[in-house]
């Protein structure tokens, strides 16, 4: 589906940036967790119960930015 393609492109961009800038391990942990969240969201979006799926989808979505920010922060500032 289109959303899966968009998620794959976003994850690919995160990987390309990480490789280009030679990011440390915490960044890659953050990217891996974001990939897991994206996969979870794809599974939730296919649910038959729209109201429950919507709630789970947006709840998972609120973790994407903090996870990626934390990974990047620890990779750049702490390492």
Image: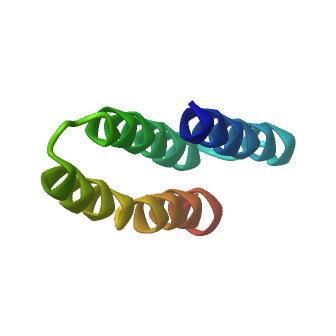
Q: Residue 58 vs residue 56: left or right?
A: right
Q: Is residue 57 above or below residue 28?
A: below
Q: In the depicted view, which residue is nearer to us: 62 or 77?
A: 62
Outermost residue, right direction?
20
Q: Residue 27 vs residue 23: left or right?
A: left
Classify residue 52 by image quadrant.
bottom left
Residue 3 position in % (x across, y down): 56, 41
Residue 62 position in % (x across, y down): 35, 67
Q: In the depicted view, which residue is nearer to us: 46 or 31?
A: 46
Quadrant in the picture for the N terminus: top right
Q: Residue at x 19, y 37 (%)?
A: 48
Q: Residue at x 58, y 60 (%)?
A: 72
- The colouring scheme, among rainbow, by chain, secondary structure or one colour, is rainbow
Quadrant in the picture for the C terminus: bottom right
Q: Residue at x 65, y 42 (%)?
A: 6
Classify residue 47 by image quadrant.
top left
Q: Is residue 13 above or below residue 58?
A: above
């Amino acid at each position: 589906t289109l959303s899966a393609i968009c998620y794959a492109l976003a994850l690919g961009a995160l990987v390309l940036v990480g490789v280009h800038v030679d990011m440390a391990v915490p960044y890659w942990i953050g990217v891996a967790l974001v990939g897991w969240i994206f996969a979870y969201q794809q599974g939730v979006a296919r649910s038959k119960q729209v109201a429950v799926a919507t709630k789970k989808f947006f709840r998972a979505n609120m973790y994407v930015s903090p996870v990626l920010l934390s990974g990047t922060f620890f990779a750049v500032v702490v390492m």
